[in-house]
Amino acid sequence: MNKSHNDENLTMVDLVKTTFAAALGVQSNKNRERDFKHGNIKVFAIAGLIFTVLFIAILICLAKLVLYFSGM
């Protein structure tokens, strides 16, 4: 009963992996084809927006933390 990714929709783990790979620009051709075949553009857009917001929030928090410890 082991299904391959070609026979099923993308899982949440696949979506997270795809989002990180897209952000880093290292998506494999095999996974890209799987995403286009089984994915939904709205889900990818929402995942991308969430990733972007979290990434910016983390950068702001890190900058504030560095400024706090530097005494500024």
Image: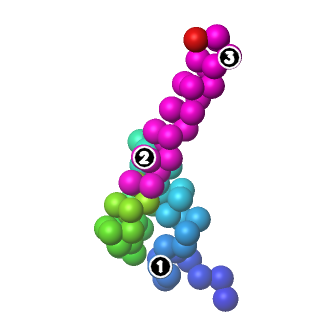
User: Disc 1 marks which residue?
Assistant: 9
How far is mark 1 from mark 3, CA to CA? 46 Å
* Residue occupying the point 65% across, 82% down: 2
Give the amino acid at mark 2.
Answer: Thr
Q: In the image, 58: left or right of 34?
A: right
10 Å neighbourhood of mark 1: few (<14), some, or many (≥20)? some
Q: Which residues are magenta?
A: 49-71
* Residue occupying the point 55% across, 38% down: 58
The spot of residue 36 in percent (x, y) is: 34, 67
Q: Is residue 66 magenta?
A: yes
Q: Secondary structure at mark 1?
A: loop
Give the amino acid at mark 3.
Answer: Phe
Give the amino acid at mark 1.
Answer: Asn
Q: Earlier in the sequence, mark 1 or mark 3?
A: 1
The mark found on residue 69 in the picture is: 3
The spot of residue 40 in percent (x, y) is: 35, 72
Q: Nearer the viewer, mark 1 or mark 3?
A: 3
Q: Nearer the viewer, residue 12 or 54?
A: 54
Q: Nearer the viewer, residue 37 or 54?
A: 54
Height in image: 19 above or below 2? above
The spot of residue 67 in percent (x, y) is: 59, 17
Q: In the image, 39: left or right of 72?
A: left
